Image: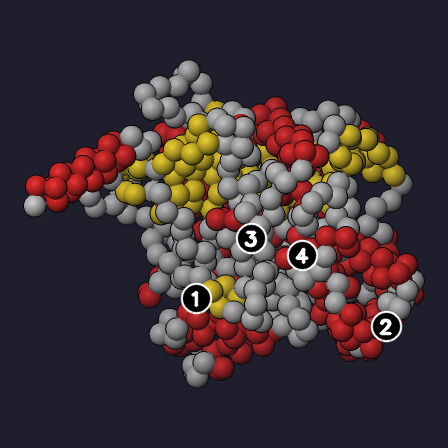
Amino acid sequence: MQLYLVVSCTLVLYQTLVLASQPEVLVQQGTLKGFWDKSVGGRPYAAFLGIPYAKPPVGKHRFKEPIPADPWIGDYYNATREPPMCLQLKHVNVKIPFPVLGSEDCLYLNVYTPAISDERSTDGKLLDVIVFIHGGAFMFLSSNMFGGSLLMDRDIVLVTLNYRLGPLGFMSLGDDILPGNNGMKDQVLALKWVKQNIAAFGGDPNSVTIAGFSAGSASVHYHVLSPLSKGLFKAAICASGSSLNPWTFAENSREKALFVARGLGCPTENSLSVIRCLRDRPAEHIVGMTRHFLNWLYNPFSPYALVVEPPSHNAFLPDTPINLLLQGKAADVPILFTFDKDEGLYPGAEIVGKTENLKEMSARWDELLPSVLDYNYAAPSEESKLEISQKIKEYYDVDLDTKEGVANFVNLLGDRLFLHGIIKAAKIHSNLYSSPVYLYRFSYMGENSFSVGFGGTKELGVCHADDIMYVFAMEKMNSQETESDRQMAKDMVDLWVSFAVNRTLDGKTFKENLPQIAFTDIQGPSKQEHMLVEDMGEEKFWDNLNLMENIIVSSHEEL
């Protein structure tokens, strides 16, 4: 009995000591307790995981704009556990096709900071902040994939966040009942939380750089355009995406919402009855209905995305991206655009990496290409859709039976889905705004690649988003397995942090070399080359195709 009491008291004492040694901060909602960790280089830092920035978007709050989280009850909030990923139709690294995973209660963020010590003292200087928005086609992934142990070797505060995905975040009825873009409004609320609270973590609320990759990169660029995001950041890093990429802007949104409603047995005579009914349906069933919009494999990979909202004081996107850019309504902030050498490996790795998929793509070219390249609804007619598919095949000299023809196919995927929109955005910002624009290409092939997660092999090339694994600690995409990779990670962290702190990079700005395109080619550790080319992304070809998006439309009309 005495031994039991001794052991029990020892355990209680141990738990009390551990609790007392936790890093602690006071934010507007109350006290947070996190945990200590060490960076890749052995530097101590504090991590606070799963901080609620919004009320759970469940029940009556489903399909509504986010509401700030309430203060928590109790002495403190335990910020030591990873938050659940948002409910999603998962695509990457799954054993069964497109499972529905995650939680509807998912609006949490994580903060990593080296600016808090055991004695709760700092040198008094607030650190620059990077807020990172994950990618995943507005459909999948989560903030938990992107840890801070690489960036914590530098004097930077990192915030990562979850936002609603797929239909729960981006369904729209095109009216005041469900205008859409709730996933983006989640991000805005998270940025406001950072503005109000990041000083408690040693971060400077007036020196925030927003960054993201893929759909997160497009999100960052949309924040540059949105009136709701003004004043919440000072610079932007857009890694492999922009608002001018076709998949970031949804077509036929109302029709999709009504299709889901009918599929789940809901009345569709008016928007209010649709939403009331869908709020009573299991969230997993709503997300599961997304499978009906994937015509082949996970394509088109972004059936839910942003829309132009009806006029409102709280519209995230009051006009088309191209109109907002050309009308000078974007935030005039420094921007770093980035891309990878073989961007088209998303979604190309899943196609060219599997013989059966490649054969099917070749046999059904005219039928499948509009879904893969996201112009199913952008072509004026079925006849013109067929004509466009053939024009693309001829222009890029695609023959999926030859190695060269397959490489050309990957190039056209990258041009259409990513590079064309990135370069176009960089040009417009450089021509119409005063802040500097920079561009880099990541050409280093390391030990791991996102191609593997998408169903291919790393030998296919430098995949879409491969550079991200050298900036963020990723369990399944480890950048610390070889000395070359470790040095590459140091270089990439230095580059990102340098831009976030100084808002400039070595070399000339994009504007200084126009009409030529200037970029820094990152070829390996300590190996960067400044490049100058006449064209990139085959801009003229894509701009001259008979697609609705190539018509600059008036306000409140979709591209």
Check disc 1 and report the residue beneath it.
177
| In-front residue for pair 495/447 | 447
Q: Residue at x 78, y 30 (%)?
A: 527
Q: CA distance from mark 2 to mark 3?
A: 32 Å
Check disc 3 and report the residue beneath it.
317
Check disc 2 and report the residue beneath it.
387
Asked if disc 1 and disc 3 are in contact, CB closer than 8 Å, the reply is no
Q: Name the front one of labels 4 and 1.
A: 4
Name the image quarter holding the C terminus. bottom right
Asked if disc 2 and disc 1 are in contact, CB closer than 8 Å, the reply is no
Of label 2 and label 3, which has the lower sequence position? Answer: 3
Three-letter code, disc 2: Glu
Q: Which quadrant holds residue 220?
A: top right
- Is 249 left, or right, of 283 in this rendering? right
Check disc 4 and report the residue beneath it.
452
At mark 1, the secondary structure is loop
The colour style of the image is: secondary structure
Q: Residue furthest left?
A: 1
Q: CA distance from mark 4 to mark 1?
A: 41 Å
| In-front residue for pair 198/39 | 39
